[in-house]
Image (cartoon, rainbow, N blue to C red):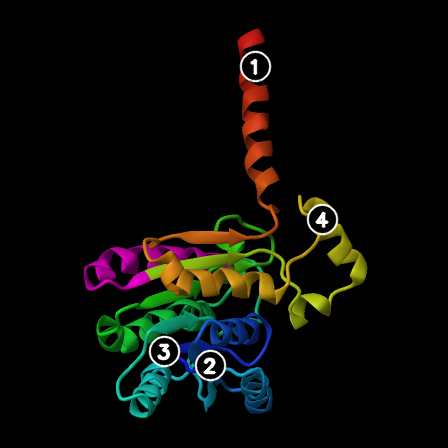
Amino acid sequence: MTATRIGIVSGGAQGIGAATAVRLAEDGVHVFVADVAVARGLETCRAIKEAGGEATFLEGDVLFAPDGPSRIVDRILDQTDGQLDVVVNNAFAFERGGTLAEVPADAFTADLQQLVVSYHSMIISAHSALSRSPQPAIVNLASIRGFHTGVGFGTYSVAKAAVAQLTRVYAQELGEAGIRVNAVAPGVIGTARTMSTAQHHRDRVASFTPLRRIGTPDDVARAITFLASPAASFITGQVLAIDGGLTLPLHTDSVNLGLAFEAGQSEA
């Protein structure tokens, strides 16, 4: 299989990023896996090549190094004669948690830098090359936590809401150049972080989910690959929840509660 498109997956060494790199390669994309985790990144690329795909590992920090995204993109363009067709903003390194009011100002700024500004910087860096592509696409990683609040998620919820809006704004602004910009909003996915929690916690989440299971990295990767593909050529500015229906009761229960309250008021 000879790749006809060139793509980058930031944070592509493991988890959702690695699954996405594999799926994109299967879809005919030469995938550049950008990550600070060298051993895992090289292993992901090796697996892709053994399956007949094309992949290149690039070591680089796109989250905390201000010029990280531009340096990564420049290295790709040097190797591809200026071609870049797909950008997947997936890199992630959030450990803080806690309540929003407790986060120091400098920490709040640092969180937004790595969770939002890094995505913005990658898009800015890739914009020129994408505008030359016949099938350009950007997919950002948002989260259902950007739609719904939760104790202990602090700046993460704020940042992921910002990623959703960043996606919509860029879809509007880059549409004239034919660049599609979408996002996926995963729910509870069985990454290493999730699988490190107690089994009974995961079972409880699954019991609240209409599909009665937590998601897999590949569930998310398949959706990203679709949004990045020509099959989604008229889709832009969308934030697709991939949560097995987990957030559906949040909507329906709120509506039912409101209707019950109104009924009670009318009877009073």
- Whether residue 157 appears in this view of the structure is yes
Instruction: Give the residue at mark 4.
Output: 212
What is the spatial separation of the Cα atoms under label 1 and label 3, in whole angstroms? 59 Å
Amino acid at pointer 4: Arg
Q: Earlier in the sequence, mark 2 or mark 1?
A: 2
- Highlighted range, magenta: 157-180
Amino acid at pointer 2: Met
Q: Position of residue 156 (x, y in %)?
A: 50, 62
- Provide the secondary structure element on which disc 2 rests: loop
Local crowd at mark 2 within 10 Å, few (<14), some, or many (≥20)?
few
Instruction: Give the residue at mark 1.
Output: 263
Instruction: Give the residue at mark 2.
Output: 1
- Provide the secondary structure element on which disc 1 rests: helix
Q: Where 93 falls versus 224 (above or below)? A: below
Q: Earlier in the sequence, mark 4 or mark 1?
A: 4
Quadrant where the C terminus is found in the figure: top right
Q: Nearer the viewer, mark 3 or mark 2?
A: 2
What is the spatial separation of the Cα atoms under label 2 and label 4, in whole angstroms? 37 Å
Q: Earlier in the sequence, mark 2 or mark 4?
A: 2
Given the current orientation, which residue lies at the most extreme right position? Answer: 200
Instruction: Give the residue at mark 3.
Output: 4
Q: Position of residue 37 (x, y in %)?
A: 55, 87
